[in-house]
């Protein structure tokens, strides 16, 4: 097994016939699952290890990965909506590994000068981000823990691109459900909200405790991954306190500004998560 330094973590560049299990990234315990890598495995990516794929396979035993794709699709719709409102700087918290329709790709398609900062606590996200964004000077990746807003917001890499005297689009997409109750997800949202200038937006998606399929999936995630809370709709709506909700409010992902009319009835995967966008008055 070959050890590689952080800057060499590029699974897409592995020699033919090698897999991520053929080498061990320095400082990473490949026997411990990662939220970012499990999500990558669910989406069919290859930037993950066997421990991540086992959880993904169990999660997909009775449900398809349609729920994860609903989340990717609303990410793109939400970023396009924000860009159309004139938002030209974005902070994507808990961004995960790059896949299709990343935040910077969507935002910079609307406005090539849009600034995007990704924040994630998985160092492999930094490695892949560096490779993906080597020639993109309007996008950065920061390794930090979103549960510490003061630290995140003080990072010079973030401050170099994001001007907090102007409105910001703050993304908490598919990440707050990985905070335990005692980590106070509502308090984390408030801390970021209070640091944003008027006219900023907060974009949240979250697992919703509304179906038996969701509760079964929650058991898998909490047991195997250690996180992944399916919370009541009313609790998720409370994360938008102090914000003006954009119509249609906090709804199932396929129902938020769909590109085409949502198919009804929704599949069980369509009921797994809700999302919405709120604007800071002023």
Image (tube, rainbow, N blue to C red):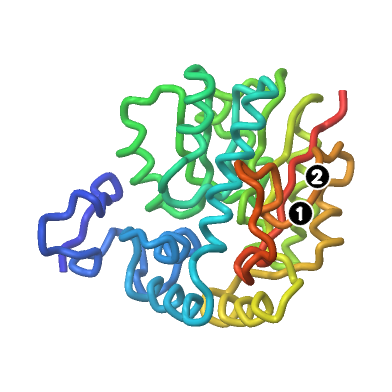
Q: Is residue 173 above or below residue 30?
A: above
Residue at 75%, 71% in the rendered image = 209
Query: Which residue is identified by label 1?
Result: 251
- Pick the quarter of the image with the C terminus: top right
Tell me whether circle 2 and circle 1 mark residues in contact (CB < 8 Å): yes
Q: Is residue 110 left or right of residue 247?
A: left
Total labels drawn: 2
The image quarter in which residue 85 lies: top right
Residue at 49%, 71% in the rendered image = 64
Query: Are there few (<14), some (14-19), or many (20+) residues within 10 Å of tag 1?
Result: some
Residue at 60%, 68% in the rendered image = 269
Q: Position of residue 228 (x, y in %)?
A: 62, 69
The image quarter in which residue 164 lies: top right
Q: Is residue 173 left or right of residue 143?
A: right
Q: Is residue 67 above or below residue 202?
A: below
Residue at 68%, 58% in the rendered image = 206
How far apart are labels 2 and 1 at the CA level? 7 Å
- Depth order, front residue of 264/20: 264
Q: Position of residue 119 (x, y in %)?
A: 53, 43
- Depth order, front residue of 149/270: 270
- Depth order, front residue of 91/59: 59
Query: Which residue is identified by label 2?
Result: 248
> Mark 2: which secondary structure?
loop
Q: Position of residue 32 (x, y in %)?
A: 42, 73
Q: Position of residue 268 (x, y in %)?
A: 63, 71
> Mark 1: which secondary structure?
strand
- Pick the quarter of the image with the N terminus: bottom left
Residue 89's disc is none
- Depth order, front residue of 58/63: 63
Q: Is residue 30 left or right of residue 229?
A: left
Query: Are there few (<14), some (14-19), or many (20+) residues within 10 Å of tag 2?
Result: few
């Amino acid at each position: 097994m070959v050890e590689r330094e952080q800057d060499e973590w590029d699974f897409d560049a592995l020699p033919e016939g090698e897999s991520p299990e053929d080498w061990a990234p320095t400082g990473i315990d490949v026997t411990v699952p990662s939220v970012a890598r499990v999500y990558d495995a669910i989406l069919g990516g290859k930037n993950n290890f066997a421990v991540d794929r086992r959880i993904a396979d169990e999660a997909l035993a009775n449900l398809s990965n349609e729920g994860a794709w609903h989340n990717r699709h609303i990410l793109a719709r939400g970023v396009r909506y924000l860009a159309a409102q004139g938002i030209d700087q974005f902070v994507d918290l808990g961004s995960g590994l790059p896949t299709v329709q990343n935040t910077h790709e969507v935002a910079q398609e609307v406005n090539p000068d849009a600034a995007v900062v990704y924040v994630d606590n998985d160092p492999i996200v930094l490695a892949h981000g560096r490779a993906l964004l080597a020639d993109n000077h309007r996008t950065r990746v920061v390794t930090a823990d979103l549960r510490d807003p003061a630290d995140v917001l003080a990072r010079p890499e973030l401050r170099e691109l994001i001007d907090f005297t102007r409105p910001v689009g703050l993304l908490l997409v598919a990440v707050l459900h990985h905070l335990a109750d005692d980590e106070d997800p509502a308090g984390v949202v408030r801390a970021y909200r209070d640091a944003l200038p008027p006219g900023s937006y907060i974009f949240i998606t979250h697992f919703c405790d509304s179906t038996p399929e969701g509760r079964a999936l929650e058991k898998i995630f909490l047991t195997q991954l250690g996180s992944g809370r399916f919370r009541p709709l009313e609790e998720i709506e409370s994360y938008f306190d102090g914000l003006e909700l954009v119509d249609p409010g906090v709804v199932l992902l396929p129902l938020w500004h769909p590109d085409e009319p949502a198919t009804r009835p929704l599949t069980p995967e369509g009921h797994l998560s809700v999302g919405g966008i709120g604007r800071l008055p002023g």
